Image (cartoon, helix red, strand yellow):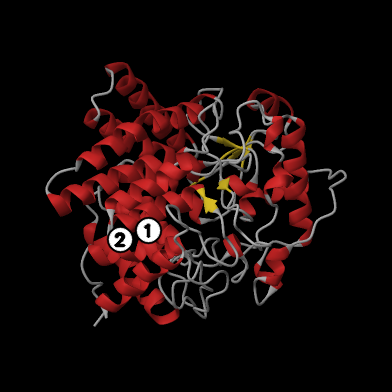
Amino acid sequence: MTETMHEQAAEILRRNDADGWTMAAPTLYPHQWSWDSAIIAVGWAHLDPERAMRELEHLYAAQWDNGKLPHIVFNPDADDPAEFPEAHWWDCSVASGAPPPPIRTSGLCQPPVHASAVLRICRLAERRDGRLSETMRRSLSGAYPRLLAWHRYLASERDPEGSGLVTIYHPWEGLDNSPRWDAALDRLTVGTVPAYRRRDLQAVDDPAERPSEQEYRRYLWLVELLKRARYDDGEIQRSHPFLIKDVFFSAIFVAANEALLELSRHVEAPEDDRREITRWIERGRRALADRWDPELQLCLDYDLRVDRPIRVRTVAGFAPLVAGTDPVHRRALLEQLDSRFFTGHPDLRWPLPPSTSPEDPAFDPRNYWRGPTWPVVNWFIWEALQPAGEHERAARPRDAALEQIQAVGFSEYFEPFTGEPPGAASQSWTAAVALEWLAEGPALSLK
């Protein structure tokens, strides 16, 4: 059975391969998404480490002059893709640092999993071959300056206050339609948005699975405002109505900086680089600790426009697990994870954390980040618990997630009570995390 799942996951990556990079899902998501691609690369590393590095090199080729890795690199061969808005809508030519044609990107970014992915790829290559090949060494040497520039962008342009937390400008930079953004979006006064057609609604069986029309107009209005600011971070920080310190994004950044620090030693980077990266790690961990809510026992985002935390129970609240935290907070977070608010809820099909707590008023079991369970979130939790020595505890989400995939398929996400798979099928990053879990040995509950 484990062999069959491995073959199925590998086949999804090969089928979604677009000659050196991987479509997130062929129908709904035919482009290269930034953090999808990093996780997909880890999946490829179990099949071909050199192909895994090429996945990220395709993304680096679209890097902006300021170091930003864009959240989408558009597929020029996509025929009337379901995903909207398309490349022309973003009009990134208004930004001085966007890559020149024929490369077309969005103007946003996504959580920086990339350095963590490169480190994992290198470790898997060494485990397989006993050493890094010359091709892999060259790829690592080429990747390091790209990753350092990307992290410097986040540590400076996305955190001009030096707070240790990354500021996002749009829900699409975080967890899309999460209720974490509802209050900030409700405050928007939406102006004129050019006419558009949402092809995503034709690509799913139930339009209720996707963001509402009201949400979508707000998303597009924020894009219009970013274009008016010419994607200039300084101007955006001054004028943009949606500025949120995203704790989940920031925690991934801390973990990625730890990976980058190790990569800096492999490439014998200057000591100044290592000192700089270490400062980012320390600053990020302190900032996450400051965002702890003792009542909810979760870490909370912070809305800069109203100067207050966002008190919603979502999986983002477990951010300190991803970043690494002290034993007291880790114990509190694991208790919260096991509680009725998340995996201890009695109606769950599998004991996996819903993206929004079923006890939260905004919970919607079929709607994207408002309730469904996501294999990629389970992977982050599994990945975070292992360095803390919580190996048996880490195995629980892995085993349940593999059972879920075995029963239902390699879906983008799952309805938490029935186990149904709304969203995109044959999702590449679901296949990738399955390959990761299967490589660690068969799940305890698989026969």
In the image, residue 95 sits, relative to residue 431, either above or below, namely: above
Label disc, if present, on residue 241 of the rendered structure:
none
Q: What residue did someone put label 1 on?
A: 379
Q: Going from the N terminus, do you reach mark 2 or mark 1 first?
A: 1
Q: Residue at x 62, y 38 (%)?
A: 101
Regarding residue 106, the answer to whether it shows in the image is: yes
Residue 289, image x, y percentages:
43, 36
Farthest residue to the left: give it: 130
Residue type for callout 2? Glu
Residue 322, image x, y percentages:
38, 47
Q: Quadrant of residue 235?
A: top right
Q: What residue did someone put label 2 on?
A: 436
Q: Position of 59 compared to 83: left or right? A: left
Crowding near the residue tagged with mark 1, few <14, some 14–19, many ≥20 C-alpha atoms within 10 Å: many
Q: Under tag 2, what secondary structure?
A: helix
Q: Residue at x 33, y 21 (%)?
A: 273
Q: Under tag 1, what secondary structure?
A: helix
Q: How many marks?
A: 2
In the image, residue 83 sits, relative to residue 287, either above or below, namely: below
- Number of the front mark, 2 or 1: 2
Residue 338, image x, y percentages:
39, 63
Kindly report the distance in space between the C-alpha atoms of the residues bearing marks 2 and 1.
Answer: 9 Å
Nearer to us in this view, 48 or 222: 48
**Quarter that holds the N terminus:** bottom left
Crowding near the residue tagged with mark 2, few <14, some 14–19, many ≥20 C-alpha atoms within 10 Å: many
Image marks 2 and 1: residues in contact by CB distance under 8 Å: yes
Residue type for callout 1? Trp
Q: Residue at x 52, y 52 (%)?
A: 32
